[in-house]
Amino acid sequence: MSNELNALNATQAYQLTDIAKTPPQFGAITPRWLTRFLEFKGLDSGIYRVNKVVEGDTPLDVLCSSEKKRAEIPAGFVEYQTKPREYILNSISTILNVDTAVADVFSSPYDQTKEQLHLAIESLKERQESQIINNDDYGLLKNVADSQRVTPIKGAPMPDDLDELLSKVWKEPSFFLAHPRAIAAFERECTRRGVPPVTASIYGGTFILWRGIPLIPTDKLFVDGLKNPKGKGGKTNILLIRVGEAKRGVIGLYQAGLQNEHSRGLAVRFRGVDDKGVASYLLSLYCSAAILADDAIAVLEDVEVGDYYDYR
């Protein structure tokens, strides 16, 4: 018999190999920059009322005079809106079921229950970011004032278009928010004009800047209604946002003081084990967002992301 037949081969050796393993890799998880850049306010009652002054340049008539003769000082009061907007927290919930027998037998090297909970929580937080942007009631896109909506000069997002957004949100703008393809399209237009944008490191990420304002990527600002469109073309929107309650900007909302609180606005409750040995967990995330002033946000609508120019 030849030596080759007596030699241990790779297939046989594989049976005894202690293979290095990874936890489950969830490809849909994103950095969720929006929820990092937003300021959040915890609510006790689940309702947030935005009281506003009735529109006008000056809510009171005032006297500006240098005359020696004392003039009559105008009197009045600052008028509030009688029906202010109220934001009610939205609940994003799911039930996770784990077979206890599977969790007991297959929990090495990774705790199966822990990994399942981790993935479920990541799914809820992905949905939270999408809802902040797209929710029919409180979503940012649906609540931009008509006066704060602009369209691109041509199709692709150009420097002039972002400057137009800056003219709408000129009081301490915080960041642009755009789909990665929209940011790439803007970079192409900047390069074409010989003004490539600079970059900056913020919160551990690297972002391009325009006029000193970072462009933050998110796939929740859909292209033709999709997170990951197949073709090169398509239309999307770009937002410019001012954040913070003190700046009368955009803020995120969450329920404070939850029982079984896991993280901001998220509760994880163990529901018990049924007769078939299945453990059940209820995950609930309470969130919303509020725009405190119309000029806190503006949108560049129907931006074309598929325009390319000839490098030759």
Image (cartoon, rainbow, N blue to C red):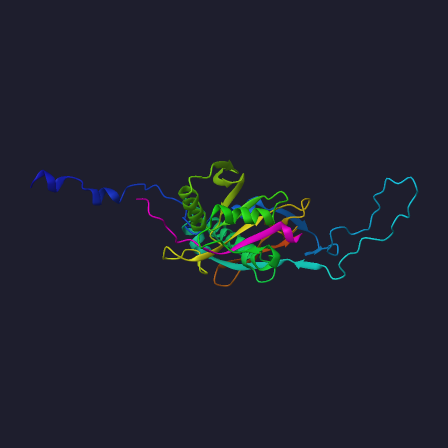
- Residue at x 55% of width, y 54% of height: 299
On the rendered structure, is 234 left or right of 204?
Answer: left
The location of residue 181, given as percent across then percent down, is 42, 50
Instruction: Give the magenta range.
Output: 293-312
Any part of residue 188 in sight = yes
- Residue at x 60% of width, y 62% of height: 137
Q: Quadrant of the N terminus?
A: top left
Tag count? 0
- Residue at x 77% of width, y 56% of height: 80
The location of residue 12, given as percent across then percent down, is 21, 44
The location of residue 175, given as percent across then percent down, is 55, 44
- Pick whichever, 81 or 284, lies toward us: 81
- Pick whichever, 120 or 62, lies toward us: 62
On the rendered structure, is 210 left or right of 84?
Answer: left
- Residue at x 67% of width, y 52% of height: 293
Q: Is residue 145 magenta?
A: no
On the rendered structure, is 118 left or right of 244?
Answer: left
- Pick whichever, 44 or 301, lies toward us: 301
Q: Quadrant of the C terminus?
A: top left
The location of residue 269, given as percent across then percent down, is 58, 55
Identify the image quadrant of residue 53: bottom right
